[in-house]
Amino acid sequence: MLKELLVIRNPRSGQGTTPLDGFLHLLHEEDYGITVRYLHRNLRVQDLLYDAANYHAVIAAGGDGTVSSVAHAMIGLDTPILAYPAGTANLISQNLGLVPNVRELAQVVMQEETLTCDLAEIHLQDMTFGFTMVAGAGLDADMIRESETLKPNFGVLAYFMGVFKNLRATEADILLELDGVAVRTRGMSVLLANFGMVNFGIPLAPGIDPADGLLSVIVVKGNTPLAIVPKIMDSFVTRMGLKTIPAPEGVEIYTCKSVRIQSDPALPIQYDGELLDATTPLTARVIPHAVRFLVPARTQRTNT
C-alpha cells in the first residue's frame, strides 16, 4: 500500500546543508507518495495541514520556527512529524538525534520510530504562540535580533556573535509566578525550556526532559553577556563527560507547568528563534505529550 507523505516546505529557510530534493528522491524510489506545500507570508501553516491526519507522516522542512509551527498545528493528531534540518541552527532536529544526512533521514522515515514529546505555548494579551524548543525574555531575544544580519555569512555562529555584539545587557527585577507560587529574582534573561540542548551540543541546564510534562524556567543572572562565558564552559565540559555539575553558577532553575513572567524594565521576547514585537509580561504553559516526532531507531529519549 502506497504511503503518502506531506511536506511543508519553507523556502525562506536559508542556511540548511541537507538538500531536501535529494531526500525526497530517495523516498520516491521507495514508493512513497509525496505532496509538497509551500509556506508563504500570507498563509497560516494550519491552512496547509487541513488534511494532515490522512498522511503517513508530515515532513516539516525549515528552521526551528517552521518545525515548531507545524508541530503546534498538529496537536491532537496521531500523524508523526519529521523535523527536517533545513534552517540555520536546527536545534529541534539535533535534540531528537537526527543527523543532517539525506540517506539517514530517509531511513528514519522508513523505520517509523517515534518519540512523544511535550509542547508549550506563550500567551501575550490576546495572542498565543506555540514553541517546541525554548522561549525567553531578555538577553536571548536581543541575541536573536542582533544575529539576523549575521546569519547569511556566519550561519549558526551568528547567534554567539549576536550575544557579544553589545557588552552590556539589561538587568531586570523579575517576578515569576510558578504554578501560582511567586518568586522574586533579578537577572538579564529568563528562558523557558522544553528541550535542553542548544548550539554545538551545549546543554542549557541539567535534567531538562521534553516528555515530563514540565517546563524548565532558567534565570540567567548578571548584566553583561560576558557573565555567561563560564556558564557555557561549565555546560560544555559537562557535555563532554569531564565533570558533572548540578547547575552552572549564576543560574536559577525552576520547573513548573505554567509560569507568568513580569519584569521591570520590560524585556523583549523570542520563541524558537522568532523575535516577537512584544515585551513582558507574558504567561506560558506546557502541553503534555502533544506530538509524535520521528526519531532514529532505538531512541528512547532526547539527548539533552
Image (cartoon, grey):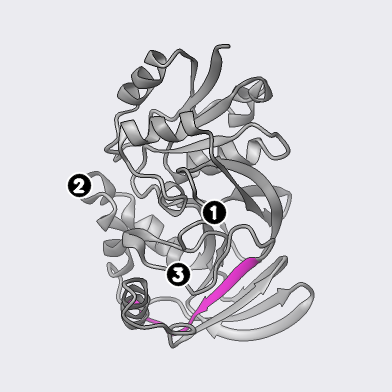
The spot of residue 48 in percent (x, y) is: 59, 23
Q: Residue furthest front?
A: 298
Residue 202 sits in quarter: bottom left
Crowding at mark 1 (Cα within 10 Å: few <14, some 14-19, many 20+): few
- Residue sitting nearer the eye, 226 or 240: 240
| Three-letter amino acid code of the residue under disc 3 | Leu
Q: At x 61% / y 65%, what residue is drawn? A: 280
Structural distance between the alpha carbons of marks 1 and 2: 36 Å
Reading the chain from its start, which is encountered first: label 1 or label 2?
2
- Residue sitting nearer the eye, 224 or 78: 78
Q: Which mark is residue 204?
A: 3
| Three-letter amino acid code of the residue under disc 2 | Asn
Is residue 96 a member of the stretch shown in magenta? no
Q: Residue furthest left?
A: 153
Reading the chain from its start, which is encountered first: label 2 or label 3?
2
Q: Which mark is residue 300?
A: 1
Visible in this render: residue 22? yes
Structural distance between the alpha carbons of marks 2 and 3: 26 Å
* Callout 3: SS: loop
